Image: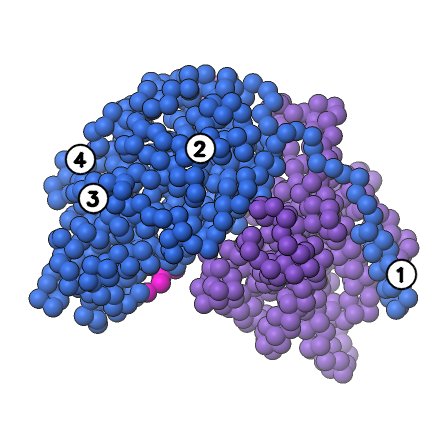
Amino acid sequence: MSKTDLTRRSVLRTGAVAGAGLALPTIFTSGASAFTNEPMGGTVTLGFNVPQSGAYADEGADELRAYQLAVEHLNGEGDGGMLNTFSSKVLEGNGIMGKKVEYVTGDTQTKSDAARASAKSMIEKDGAVMITGGSSSGVAVAVQGLCQEAGVIFMAGLTHSNDTTGKDKKANGFRHFFNAYMSGAALAPVLAARYGADRKAYHLTADYTWGWTQEESIAAATEALGWQTVNKVRTPLGAGDFSSYITPVLQTDADVLILNHYGGDMVNSLTNAVQFGLREKMVNGKNFEIVVPLFSRLMARGAGENIKGILGSTNWHWSLTDAGSQAFVKSFGTKYGFPPSQAAHTCYVQTLLYADAVARAGSFNPCAVVEALEGFEFDGLGNGPTLYRAEDHQCFKDVLVVRGKENPTSEFDLLEVVEVTPAAQVTYAPDHPMFAGGALGACNAG
Amino acid sequence: MFGLNKKDTSFLLIVIALTMATPILLQPFAEGSELAQFNGGYPDLMQKIAIFGIFAVGFNILFGLTGYLSFGHAAFLGIGSYAAVWMMKLLTMNVIPAILLAMIVSGLFAAAIGYVSLRRSGIYFSILTLAFAQMSYKMAYSVLTPLTNGETGLQLALDDPRILDGAAEGSSLPVTNIFGIAMNSSYKLEALGRVFTFNVGYYFCAFIAILAFYVAIRLFRSPFGMMLRAVKSNQQRMTYTGLDPKPYTLAAFVISGMYAGLAGGLLAAMDPLAGADRMLWTASGEVVIMTILGGAGTLMGPVLGAGVIKYLENIFSKINEGVLHDWFSFLPDGVENVVIWVFARFTGEGWHLTLGVTFMLVVTFLPGGLIEGLRRLSKRVKHGSQKRDKYDDPDPEHRPEPGKRVAGE
């Protein structure tokens, strides 16, 4: 059955044939459209790439609801939501430039690889002209890189790492959500005012780009106010049980625990911390405090009782009373029966901003969209006057400092806004050391 | 031809023809029709099928021939990807050096891990390989962050040196290429209401896959392959005849590790990013499932398994509730919701359930994998449905004949 003449000659011959094959000139050329996935028919396809499984699945589900709502509003169905309060008035509820908006969805699994594969198939198979979503900065950075290469626009969803618009910024990528530096800048003064300037902080940090930059930002902001940082411990994403990380906290003289966790991880680590009695503890004659720099209502619901009195920052909260927020909460509530989360808000806004930029530019060409978004100033989308800075494609707007409510009136009324930090206080130079080391590059239209 | 007998040559030619025609074969439904959802002829999926085909063929050299079940093969895939991306960062965007380095580095790792793991066999071997793979994953995820960029994954940057490519022209990232031909360029042909995409990256992968497949055929048919089969059937007997199985198994382990590295390198060549998730134990399990689903120990089986799994993963995971609504909108509301609820469990993020059910059915009714199913089918077509007695078993591998009695027993 075996026939074996694997001689030196035959190997060489095979190698030569292989080499000749590789050296053959190609007859294949790129397609002839002006840019990647130029919408030709009466519809335009957007790709919603959100985590449907993993530690951030709750956020992902809420993001998807917001996207569906945004598509409805763009197509002129429903009550129009924030389209009515948006300062730019070019969107008419007839899709985007008369093309009906359709969408495809994908599961990022909160993994860079899976997210990229999913985004890739949206671009290659479904012809998506814009990708948006993500509930993890690692994923956002990876997908943003892919979109840059493929020549489509990436509108980042919930991503809070400095790197998304810092070290890893890309010309085709835009972020509406705030970032870790802004959290630090907004939170630190409130912390100092409430807990004093003489505190010792212990960090537990999710071990990826977001955790690292948030730890760095918060530590820098609090140390500037006189706090000491006792220890910084990295925990794996989706660890499930954090008790082994909480016990060592008790051995130190730290009197503040900073949880740089998000989603299901934060719910678990906070629950563990409370179970270990950290909140009743007295250290150095001071009450032990827990801080969660990035807060969301979904996490607050998951953590239940434990969240009461805990300080954090958030991008947006449904209890805001401006016209934009109210319009959004109303149409979201009518459709789904409960108020939206900050993840839902930022995703909804990003979709509107993209559609608006296309309409203002008069083209789906990514380079035209980039031009329309850069330096764009708008209002009426729930965060007050906002600027999309041209240098790094980051939005600058007010940041909310929130606290877990002591006496919630409903299962959604879990956070109260302590302070609205004005945009000026959280603005930084584009070449700030925490954001240095990257370049936008040129926009890529494919 | 090429040192193959007639049967293998025609087999190889069929495989080549199928691979070349994949962009057409996977695009059977007209654009815009209801069934267009099931078209799989887009570059990313086709590349994945070819690449994971290579991965599974390599895994099969170890598992199918020697019977050593490695549960850590994804580690080599990941190592290959990292090596390839580093090559693209430091040397050139041409994929050839990247792929070569990927194979060399994963081969070295395989030699080291294999040397230790192969001291044990059976379940202990599986556990050892699993442990090594998880160690590699954890290291890539946290300890080796400067080398691997942790959870975010290793990516290209504008300011990478890329010595051979010279100064970067323009301010956008370069794309992977082979001697200047970009991997992501493709030629779209519109015909018969369908859009066929002929992608450079896919044909590159396909070419490498055919080479890898050819090497595997030669291995299967060689005396070396015979020795590996001997390891599987009875290692003790082999030792008694004076043969040391260790060098053979180690060689098989390294070869299959290099196949995995090659696949990893190709993944990076198609999409220059290397993430630690690639080394996770689920990824190792996936290649085991691919091989068994297709048919372990057969040549074509693993490729078939890889194709089926990647197709399910990419196509079924995209059928969300909105799509289901479109399909079943003709049903009355109440019934529609029930039907959609049931289908939604098996599609979208529930595609794993579909995979699980398929896997269970195949393992129960076709222990030889999908290949056995095809074989039975062709037999049925050729000979009609004859009644078979219980000794006429088509799959002797899984139910071996009782051994011949030895004198003096």
**Do discs 4 and 2 share a chain?**
yes
Distance between the Cα atoms at labels 2 and 1? 57 Å
Q: Nearer the viewer, mark 3 or mark 4?
A: 3
Q: Which residue is mark 3?
A: A402
* Marks 1 & 4, CB-CB < 8 Å contact: no
Badge 1 marks a residue whose secondary structure is helix
Badge 4 marks a residue whose secondary structure is loop
Q: Which residue is mark 2?
A: A373
Tell me the purple chain. B
Q: Nearer the viewer, mark 4 or mark 2?
A: 2
Tell me the blue chain. A
Q: Which residue is mark 1?
A: A13
Please tell me how crowded label 2 is: few (under 14), some (14-19), or many (20+) other residues with Cα within 10 Å: many
Relative to B42, A320 lies left or right: left
Please tell me how crowded label 1 is: few (under 14), some (14-19), or many (20+) other residues with Cα within 10 Å: few
Please tell me how crowded label 4 is: few (under 14), some (14-19), or many (20+) other residues with Cα within 10 Å: few
Q: Quadrant of the N terminus of chain B?
A: bottom right
Point out which mark residue A410 bears.
Answer: 4
**Do discs 1 and 3 share a chain?**
yes
> Going from the N terminus, do you reach mark 2 or mark 1 first?
1
Q: Nearer the viewer, mark 1 or mark 4?
A: 1
**Residue A36 appears at what percent x and percent y?**
60, 33
The range drawn in magenta is A233-238
- Report how many numbered discs are placed on residues in the image: 4
User: Which residue is depicted at the point 47% across and 20% down?
Assistant: A95
